[in-house]
Image (cartoon, rainbow, N blue to C red):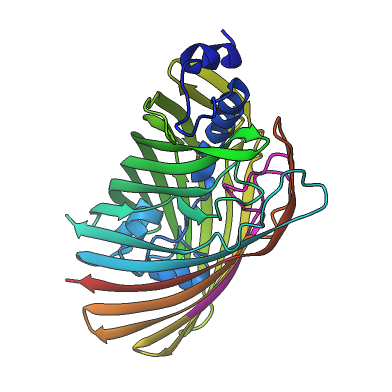
Amino acid sequence: MGIITGLFKIYKDIRIMKGFRLSLYALAVGTLLSSSLAHAAAFQLYEVGAPINGTATVGQAAETKDASIAYYNPAGMTHIQGTQFLLGAQNTLQYTNFSPNASTTIAGSNGANAGGLLPGLGAFFVYGATPSLKLGLSLTTPYGGALSYQNHWVGRYNVQQMMFYTVNLNPSIAYQINRWASVGAGISVEYANLYQTVAIPVSASPPFDGQATLKLDSAAPGANLGMLFTPSPNTNIGIAYRTQIIHNLRGNTNFANIATTPSTTSRMVMPSNIIASITQNVSPKATLLGEVGWANWSSMRNMVITIQGITADIPQDWSNTYRLGVGGQYKATPDFLLQAGVSYDSSPTSSSKRLPVLPMDRQIRVGLGIEYAMVRAATLGLSYEYINLGSAPINNTNAIGTLSGNYSRNYTNVFQASVNIGC
């Protein structure tokens, strides 16, 4: 059964309160569009409330000065003395303004600023069972995003509002094999939650839109592995790998002014990725940081959604991405550590495949941070990070029309604060 035939069979007797008959065309296209938005989770956050935001997260797999290493690379826990706990918070302030061009055939506004304030938390714990054996636990939000466009903007048939977040619980273990090599591993349970609204074109004359709301969630397992090498007392080389996590989101789709709420499922892939980092002390006060990475975003080849037993397979054709970064740290005084960094992540998609639910192009991060040892056992971390998400051009044509343009303003500010306590 085709999706159009199936939708007609399910909804042919449904009417909208205002007297408009909900057309087969509107339901089919509206549902297909809303389904293709379920990949909003694709925005991966390296920022999880830790002080390393101050280096644009460069050095994440090799920097072992606080308990956040339990998440970034469990092998690095072997360099943590005793027991440590880090609690971090961050606020992400995003500015996202779309500018349609003359190729856009859908009437509407530019949507104004779709960005907003998104809070986040991170908690990390490392316990020294023996000098060589360490146990860890982290609680993070590694994927997420929030957008709120004006209801009657030109891209409303793709997205109006979206809120997506994940919560990842990751216990881990590490063992120091010898003076220069350590290994670590962890398992994770990740909860994902998606809320999204999308307009449905009910009538062209006079123009009238309906609305669909998706509410889906899922819990799925994953794993991570890490290695840390210390060829000299001044050098750390870390390699961290995370497996993909496949979320089979379940929930329902609500239609405005329609009593039925059909069950809905969607498959979402969080890609596997690998990060290699190095820290090199070049003097008693200065340290250089470097990083390369790779993420398997080609696993997002398609998006599958099922509504009331009817399945649509929507091609995405994403590409694998790479990451490069450099940073530095300078110990201005015994109690103050200054840090800075810049990183680059390539774009996972192109203008013909990009949708306004994820206005992300290549990413450039610039971070600044400071750490202050308040007392011997407690260190305060403060950082600011600027993330430029690029112009993210869109040139997407579907059954409703063409959405074309780019983002005149598309960046994020991340403000982070944390405290690391050791005993």
Magenta highlight range: 339-363
Q: Please state the horizontal and vertical placement of residue 4, each as a whole percent of the image.
A: 60, 16
Magenta segment: does it hold 356? Answer: yes
User: Which is the main secondary structure of the residues drawn in magenta?
Assistant: loop
Magenta segment: does it hold 104? Answer: no
Q: Please state the horizontal and vertical placement of residue 310, each as a whole percent of the image.
A: 49, 16
Q: Is residue 108 left or right of residue 252?
A: right
Quarter that holds the C terminus: bottom left
Q: Is residue 197 above or below residue 379?
A: above
Q: Please state the horizontal and vertical placement of residue 93, each as a whole percent of the image.
A: 48, 68
Quarter that holds the N terminus: top right
Numbered marks: total: 0
Q: Is residue 98 left or right of residue 412?
A: right
Q: Nearer the viewer, residue 341 or 95?
A: 95
Q: Residue furthest top?
A: 1
Q: Residue furthest front?
A: 19
Q: Is residue 342 left or right of residue 256?
A: right
Q: Nearer the viewer, residue 350 or 372?
A: 350
Q: Please state the horizontal and vertical placement of residue 259, each as a whole percent of the image.
A: 37, 27
Q: Can residue 287 be seen in the rendering of this structure?
A: no
